[in-house]
Amino acid sequence: MARSVSFDVDGVIAGGDWIPEWDRKPEIYSELPVLDPMISGYLESLMYNFNLYFVSARSYVGATYNTRRWLINNCDLPKRAISGVICAEEYTSRKERKAFKIDVIRALNPIIHMDDEPEILEALRPDQRVWFRQADNHWPNPDEIEKRCRFVAESWNELGVFFEELCRGRLS
């Protein structure tokens, strides 16, 4: 079985401000910018070595289809680069969406999962955790970040060497 890498979408790949519950509609998500122009190149290099999955707590009818289309159009990814997009379309509460997302990531069992939410990462094995630190997301105990995550990054630029080592098989 091929190894996989999974990513959160909003706050990791898609930029923009936090979206209030009442504004979480397809047209809002379709207008989000790519967080960093380097994303396309990194994802393209990873696709040759790993199955890429995108797991989101987006919860509106058509979220999975729209998220896949957004990734292809905005990240310049060929369709074959995306092994799967999984969204929490049928869950309404924040708690249900988080639980769904955690269950999906655990089922995929990726070698790494990259997320900007400490609560999601805490539910995974430490060797799977790659925290994309945002200014407004803080780890509950900052002194333990290095011990609790495989890698911590504040920009996609910092991820370059990590991804290169991952692709070369130096990180298992």
Image (spheres, rainbow, N blue to C red):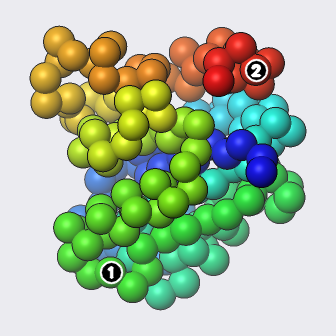
Residue 132: % across, % down: 42, 31
Tell me how far mark 1 sits from mark 2, CA to CA: 37 Å
Label annotation for residue 169: 2
In the rendered image, the quadrant that contains the C terminus is top right
Is residue 75 visible to the viewer in this orientation of the structure? no
Report the side of 3 relative to 108 (left or right). Answer: right
Disc 1 target residue = 91
- The amino acid type of the residue labelled 2 equals Gly
Asked if the residues shown at circle 1 and circle 2 are in contact, with their CB atoms under 8 angstroms apart, the answer is no
Compared with 168, 129 (above or below) is below
SS at mark 2? loop
Badge 2 density bin: few <14, some 14–19, many ≥20, Cα 10 Å: few
SS at badge 1: loop
Identify the residue at horizontal 33%, vertical 13% (top origin). 146
Going from the N terminus, do you reach mark 1 or mark 2 first?
1
Give whichever of 17, 86 is nearer the camera: 86
- In this view, the residue in front, 100 or 33, is 100
Residue drawn at (52%, 76%) of the image: 63
* Vertical comparison of 57 with 111: above or below: below
Q: Residue at x 57, y 56 (%)?
A: 108
Q: Nearer the viewer, mark 1 or mark 2?
A: 2
The foreground one among 135 and 128 is 128
x and y percent of residue 72 in the render? 74, 59
Residue 63 at least partly seen: yes
Q: Position of residue 61 (x, y in %)?
A: 47, 87
Quadrant of the rendered structure where residue 50 is? top right
What type is the residue that disc 1 sits on?
Tyr
Instruction: Kindly identify which numbered label has been placed on residue 80.
Output: none
Note whether 160 is above or below 77 in the view shown. Answer: above
